[in-house]
Image (spheres, rainbow, N blue to C red):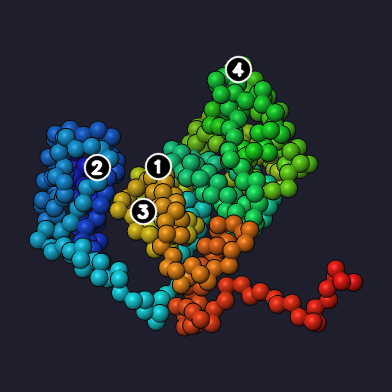
Amino acid sequence: MTSEYLDNAIGYFLSIKEKLESTGNNSKTIKLKNILAVLGYRRRSQLIVDKINCTLSDLQLSVNPSIDMSIDFDRRISISLKNKAVKTEQNNSSVRNKSLDLNAISSIQVKCDFLSHLFDLGSEQEYERLQACLDSNQPIGIFFVPLEDDFFSEVVIKVLNYELIRKYQYLGISGTPSSSTSTFSSVSSDLATSHLNINDVASTSGIIRFDRETMHNVLLGKTGLEMLDSEQFENEFSQVSLYAHKYNNEQFFVVFHCPSELEIRKQGRLDLFSDVVDKVSERLPFTFTLKCKYSSSNSLLLDQEVYKDICSHLKLLMEMPSYESEEEEATLLEYFVELQKAQAQFESQLFLTIEPHYFNKLTWGHESTEHIYLKYFAIRTLEEIGYNLLDIQCEKSIEKTSEIIDVDAR
């Protein structure tokens, strides 16, 4: 056990202690595997366990359950200050049930979206251009370039999927893709899609992906098979770009999962990478290169301020800004999946929790479920800012009068 470990462990647990003292929180919950990952270990030994427990004890921190060799890696560990009284569930319940103080309502503070925190786009203008394109219905090309590890692309793909589905729902489009992603794989892969019709693939997908092996062969390939894969990529992308311009009137994304910037630089392929991006940009004008600022998930977790801002924005995207996670240091993928589950559970229970006097206010037609939700929350918001429920009408019907021309009578 090196002094470097001791420095990391003391610094890490000390930051937790200081946070508990400054915020007044009772405890901080972290998965065991995330604790070990931050300290630089993928496996545990009795020596590591003893050192962790010793460090916690020296800092006057208690854990529940105790850390030992028998508990699961995914078990949540609650870290708290020793001898600090824990609030009872009854007290928490009374706080939650207090009436809303409208004077205490403040706007939701989110400094920037998670893309600006995670990625370097080269300039502020390029970032603004990306934001404008995301609000449009244009096809967009995205190159994901990890600094070292790709810990982010699956999260971003999930966010893009979610945004596309929401666009369909709010526009009332009935044809939401049931399969929202399609992946073009290396010709050496069993999942190669060379026999698939591009129109069939693109028409059922909001996101078309060129996987990491394909892009590795395109950018770093040297063997004959890798060169063949590069040629295959050219053909497949030509078909995708043709579809984007001629047949598609809804937004979709073409995503390129590139090898790490470290690999590209090491093999002297920066010029080739720029050339590939330029060729794609000629056919998909709205193409962006997203270079990750962090080398790994652990390096992001160590930057707590940025991590919190990213989580805050993800909560806002999922329409759950007040959600509090039990796992405060989950990976981005774990955190977003947890948000998805919580959001789905909330929506499934919403109708069951609507009180009769609000339920009867809703006007029912052929609108989507999301439209009904919006009506309900609009009514509740108007009531909370001071309007009487009796004076709120969900939809005002136009009564026929003698002044209205009867088309059929004419």
How far apart are the alpha carbons under marks 4 and 1? 30 Å
The amino acid beneath tag 3 is: Asp
Reading the image, the residue beneath label 2 is: 75
Q: Residue at x 34, y 59 (%)?
A: 324
Reading the image, the residue beneath label 1 is: 296
Q: Quadrant of the C terminus?
A: bottom right
Residue 167 in sight here: no
Q: Earlier in the sequence, mark 2 or mark 3?
A: 2
Q: Secondary structure at mark 3?
A: loop
Residue 169 in sight here: yes
Reading the image, the residue beneath label 3 is: 303
Counting other residues with Cα less than 10 Å from the Cα at mark 3, is it few (<14), some (14-19), or many (20 or more)? few
Q: Earlier in the sequence, mark 1 or mark 2?
A: 2
Q: Is the Cβ of the residue at disc 2 closer than 8 Å to that at disc 3? A: no
Counting other residues with Cα less than 10 Å from the Cα at mark 4, is it few (<14), some (14-19), or many (20 or more)? some
Q: Is the Cβ of the residue at disc 1 closer than 8 Å to that at disc 2? A: no
> Depth check: 381 or 184 in front?
381
Q: Residue at x 20, y 66 (%)?
A: 90
Q: Is residue 106 above or below residue 347?
A: below
Q: Is residue 33 left or right of residue 404?
A: left
